[in-house]
Image (cartoon, rainbow, N blue to C red):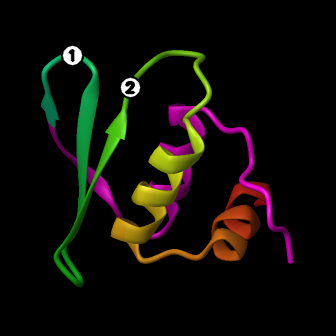
Amino acid sequence: MSHRFPAVTSKEVVRVLTKIGFYFLRQSGSSHAIYKRDSDKKRTVVPLHSGVIVKRKTLKSILQSAGLTLDEFEDLLKE
């Protein structure tokens, strides 16, 4: 069990979200994308900054709104 958040880009976060059923809903401005999952009506917002590492607090918020634990996220990231 890891206690550190991984250093990931928004592209990697989106890849994990699509694996668990989220799809692109719409874009808010030029820097945020909204993803949704119909099975449980969850939504999450992902910042779109190419090549920039997502901050820890932002990643934590994304994981909470997606209903993922850090361990589940890391496992999906490795697949």
**Cα–Cα gap, marks 1 and 2:** 8 Å
- Residue at the spot 34% in from the left edge and 61% down from the top edge: 22
Picture layout, residue 5 above or below residue 72: above
SS type, badge 1: loop
Residue, disc 2: 48
Q: Which of the two residues, 4 or 49, is positioned nearer the viewer here?
A: 4
Quarter containing the N terminus = bottom right
Please name the amino acid that badge 1 sits on: Ser
Q: Does 41 sit left or right of 58 as displayed?
A: left
Residue nearer the viewer, 15 or 5:
5
Residue 40 found in image quarter: bottom left
Residue beneath the point at 51% across and 62% down: 19
Mark number, residue 53 = none
Residue at the disc numbered 1? 30
| Amino acid, disc 2 | Leu
Q: Please report contact status of discs 1 and 2: CB closer than 8 Å, yes or no.
A: yes
Say if residue 39 shows up in the picture.
Answer: yes
Residue 2, given in percent of the width and then of the height, sits at 85, 69
Range of residues picked out in magenta: 1-26
Residue ranking furthest to the bottom:
40
Q: Residues within 10 Å of mark 2 (few under 14, many from 20)?
A: some
